[in-house]
Every structure is written in C-alpha cells, then in structure tokens.
Image (cartoon, rainbow, N blue to C red):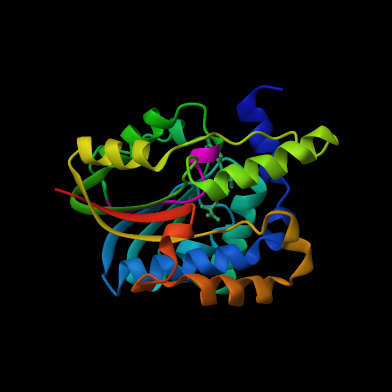
Amino acid sequence: MERKAEVKTFFEKTDIYFYFDYNIKIRTEIVADLINNTTYDCVLDMPCGNGFISLKNSKNFKELTLVDFSKNMIALSKEMAEEEKIENVSFICGDIFETDFEDESFDLIISLGILAHLDDIDKFLNYIQSKVKSGGNVIIQNTNSTHFYSHLIRLYLGVRQLFGKDKYRLNKVPASRVEDSFQKAGFKLEKVFRYNQSFIGFSRLFSNDRKYQLTRKWFGDVNNNKNASLGSDYIYLFKKD
Ligand SMILES: C[S@@+](CC[C@H](N)C(=O)[O-])C[C@H]1O[C@@H](n2cnc3c(N)ncnc32)[C@H](O)[C@@H]1O
C-alpha cells in the first residue's frame, strides 16, 4: 500500500486515541502553557486528530480551523465542538497539501504528531512556515530520531516487527532538521518542552492516569522542564520575525 494510504487507514481507527489519551492530555496542557494566555485571532490546527488539543484551548482563539484527512478524526472533532458548544471553529477533511490557505493567514499554527508520518517533511515545514503571519507563532512537535530514547524505541519496534506486529514505519527526524529549517525561514525558538511519550514495552503495565502522573512527575511542565535532556519528544514554540 502507498504510504499516504497506509497512514490514512491507520488513523481512521480512532481507538488508538483512547489508548494514548494520557499523551493527548499532556500535549493539551503543554500547548496551554506555551500559549500562556495569549489571545490569537486566526488559528490552524493541522493535523488535528480528534481535535481535543486545540478545542480545549479554543477560549484563546477567535477563529479556529481544524484540518485532518481522517474522516473519523474529523467526526470526533465535530462531536466535541458540538458537545462543548464551541462556535468559532471550522473543519476541513482533506490532505494537508490540498488546503489552499493564503500565505501569512494565521497567527498561530499547531502541528503535533505529523512529522513522523509524512513523505515530504521539508515541504510540510516550508508550507506551515509560509502560512503563519509575521509576529505569529508555530507550535510543532517532533520526536528527535538521534536521541538515545528514540534508538530504544526503534529497537523495541524492530523486535515487534520480527514477530509480524507494527508493520507501520515512522520517519526518522533529527531535532536539528526542524530547528535549522525554522531558523532559516526567519523564526526564533521561544520555548521547548521535552518529555517521552512512549513507555516502550511497559505501556500496558500502567493505566492512562498513571502514565500521565509518571510523565508529569518526571518531566514537569514548560516552566520547569525537569530531566529535559532525557526527553526525545520536543514540543517547540517558534515565533516568526
Ligand atoms: C499522530 S496524529 C496527531 C493528531 C493531533 N495533532 C495530536 O497530536 O493528537 C496524526 C494525524 O495526522 C493525520 N494526517 C497524517 N497525514 C496527513 C495528511 N497528509 N493530511 C491530513 N492529515 C494527515 C492523521 O489522520 C492523524 O489524525
């Protein structure tokens, strides 16, 4: 199967989200910390997954646009927006690169959990960099492929693949590739939070609540990021000059 189709099939199964919901909760709180009560006019969450992260922060946004090519993810996002009576939100079910936003149309772009899944990472980075206004922000997540913990994760996934599990392959993206790309495009790094989202083979030993508590205890929050050097997952806040 072509990679894009493989990614789409994978993310049409929304149950993955319930399995990882401690991570969504952490990402939502980290985005809130990074926003730090700033109000943004036009915000894009792309890809949005089930929408939880930006919808939970939507009181800080005048207009929010959610994009994802998984129709089941968009359905969950719409459900949540309706339940929580969030009105300033629009939804696009489609491919990232088929959106036709004008350049410099957003004050904030949130892009979490996407770099590991794309064919063309530089195209995506250049795309979002061009869609944010001068003085605007990008919040983007990457798992640093050169970090020792990423090597451990790949070893674990490699063993699972030997037994026919998890055929799905994630891109390897070093932190320097993301940081250099934003720097060249005229962005400044304002903040970064580092943690580990994977419990490798031990995930099933803990409930989502426990995984949330352990992660928070070990890595703290944006203003007090404990043990940051041990975290292979980076959530950046960049600002465009
Ligand atoms: C790991 S999830 C991250 C979702 C959300 N940002 C989060 O952090 O919970 C990746 C999402 O990217 C979407 N996706 C992957 N490739 C895409 C593409 N080319 N166009 C639109 N959505 C895409 C998937 O459907 C999936 O919902």
Outermost residue to the top: 2
Residue 89 visible: no
Horizontally, is 176 left or right of 147 in the view?
Answer: left
Quadrant of the frame with the N terminus: top right
Q: Residue at x 29, y 75 (%)?
A: 37
Q: Quadrant of residue 187?
A: top left
Pick the residue in front: 128 or 40.
Answer: 128
* Residue 62 placement: quadrant: bottom left
Is residue 3 in view?
Answer: yes
Residue depicted at 33% across the width and 74% down the height: 223
What residue appears at the point 43 percent right and 54 percent down from the top-left corner? Answer: 234
Count of marks, rendered view: 0
Return the x and y of residue 170 as percentages of the image width and height.
Answer: 60, 36
The residue lying toward the viewer, choosing from 187 and 177, is 177
Identity of the residue furthest to the right in this view: 163
* Left or right of 124 in this view: 71: right
Residue furthest to the left in view is 241
Task: Specify whether residue 55 is painted magenta.
Answer: no
Q: Which residues are magenta?
A: 107-116
- Quadrant assignment for ligand 1: top right
132 vs 57: above or below: above
| Nearer to us in this view, 9 or 149 | 149
Q: Is residue 183 left or right of residue 203?
A: left
Note whether 85 is above or below 196 in the view shown: below
Provide residue 116's location: percent of width, then percent of height: 53, 39
Question: Measuring 72% from the left and 36% from the top, which residue is drawn there?
Answer: 158
Q: Position of residue 98 (x, y in %)?
A: 45, 31
Residue 88 percent across, percent down from the top left: 40, 64
Q: Quadrant of residue 180?
A: top left
